[in-house]
Image: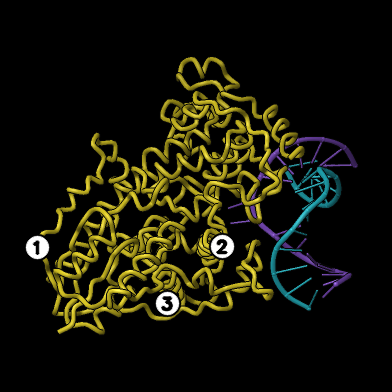
Chain colours: A yellow, B purple, C cyan
Amino acid sequence: MSTALVLFRRDLRLIDNPALTAACASHAHVLPVYIHAPDEDGAWAAGGASRWWLHHSLTSLQARLHSHHAGLHICQGDSLDHLQKLIKLSGAEAVYWNRLYEPKSIARDKHIKTTLREQGIDVHSHNAALWLEPWQIATQQGDPYRVFTPYWRNLRTQIAPSEPLPEPTLRGWKKLKGGLALSALKLLPAIAWDGGLAESWQPGEHGASQMLELFCDDAINDYAHARDLPARHGTSRLSPHLHFGEISPRQIHFALREHVKHIDAKRRPDIEPYLRELGWREFAYHLLYHFPKTPTENFNPRFEGFRWNPPDKALLARWQQGRTGIPLVDAGMRELWHTGWMHNRVRMIVASFLTKNLRQHWHEGERWFWDTLVDADLASNTLGWQWVAGCGADAAPYFRVFNPVTQSKKFDPDGVYLRRWLPELADAPIALLHEPWKDAGLLKSSGYPAPIVDLAQSRIEALAAYQAR
DNA sequence: TTTTGAGTTGTTCGA
DNA sequence: GTCGAACAACTCAAA
């Protein structure tokens, strides 16, 4: 009657979970385990919003396991120590997990694997998060890709949607005494700032599949166009679910293809633009794996001596609080603070504003996003900030400076998004809503701040700084 | 080895 | 108002 441990990390689902399925197939008893070890993530331990999500996602996973008469054994502290103790207590002869790809996680898991194998334990790791793992794709010369388009052309030919693994059914779930209650991990905020998150999201496998269903029913039909409009729910909003592994790209791909199969060819939505976005996620993992220093170092070494403005705490605080005086920037930053998420286009705009108009170092934005986003992901966050700042792989050309007013008029022409997040301007006429500084009386009566920077002037200065690089 | 075509998401200016 | 060009040069990836 052999026993296996299944270690859950960022694969918080029962369906299409290769480690869980493999363990259940080969062992009579399976013990699901979660070990909370933020210290092992160093500077990139989960931020506040991510911890909130994690708490609720684990709650959901516990409920899913309970419905199988199983439990989740929770502990906190050194991963290897806990695994060794649990192996002894349960008599397990094997450990299963799904792989992570952050540099620190890779090093830790390698160490755990070596140590346990030396002790005669079988260790099996699986891919639950990616179409192809970072080392499974390379240029013809055998190098990692640095440009998205050829990467995607290659990846696209290798992904064929296949049926997700079913939820495993096993009678022999193992339970041990001595696990922690989830609340002992203290993942929820001490002061309740999380009301907006709870209104906006339903973490967990069930929430993920509901979000996917919603996407299939609605946004995918007009994705190529509506994904650019922040007032609309035109994107999938699956990013936090993907980050925590409540759903996998392969599940999404399969579901989308099944969904569009039954639609008349003339009205069938084109899912390629969305798959391409999943391709960007995959590319981010590819880059982080092959260039592990990029969360803290410029991908492009020519940016070493770049003339960032000196760090300015006051300016940064105004950006963080959504009080820059630029409506679209402020709306985005407030959406982020309230919901733990920001529309993709608006992310680019607030990031361009911070790095180009304010010329604050991209690390500042990277760090703020890390703490406030429910979908904060080291690979995607790194790629995104380096791309906007211009120092990344396949980065935006230096002269690409977003004009938040132009973007606002173009992508939120009726001001629906602005009015939603800037209640003090809700009654302003549309012409002024995009540029409220044009009416001093409006600023005074609304209390909305004047711009903290001159957009035109700062653009010119940014172009000069980037040209001098 | 060398050559060739190409590279997420923009803005401004002038015709 | 619409449209194309300029905004740089570099380096990536494949032929």
- The residues tagged by marks 3 and 2 sit, at their Cα atoms, a distance apart of 34 Å
At 69% from the left edge and 29% from the top edge, which residue is drawn? Answer: A456
- The residues tagged by marks 1 and 2 sit, at their Cα atoms, a distance apart of 41 Å
Chain ID at mark 1: A
Q: Which one is earlier in the sequence, the residue at label 3 or at label 2? A: 3
Q: Which one is earlier in the sequence, the residue at label 3 or at label 1? A: 1
| Residue A274 can be seen, yes or no | no
What x and y, as percent, mark residue A403? 64, 37
Q: Which one is earlier in the sequence, the residue at label 1 or at label 2? A: 1
Q: Which residue is mark 2?
A: A290
Callout 2 environment at 10 Å: few (<14), some (14 to 19), or many (20+)?
Answer: some
Q: Which residue is mark 3?
A: A258
Q: Which residue is mark 1?
A: A177
Q: Secondary structure at mark 2?
A: helix
What x and y, as percent, mark residue A75? 20, 57
Q: Identity of the amino acid at label 2?
A: His
| Residue A453 can be seen, yes or no | yes
At 14% from the left edge and 53% from the top edge, which residue is drawn? Answer: A181
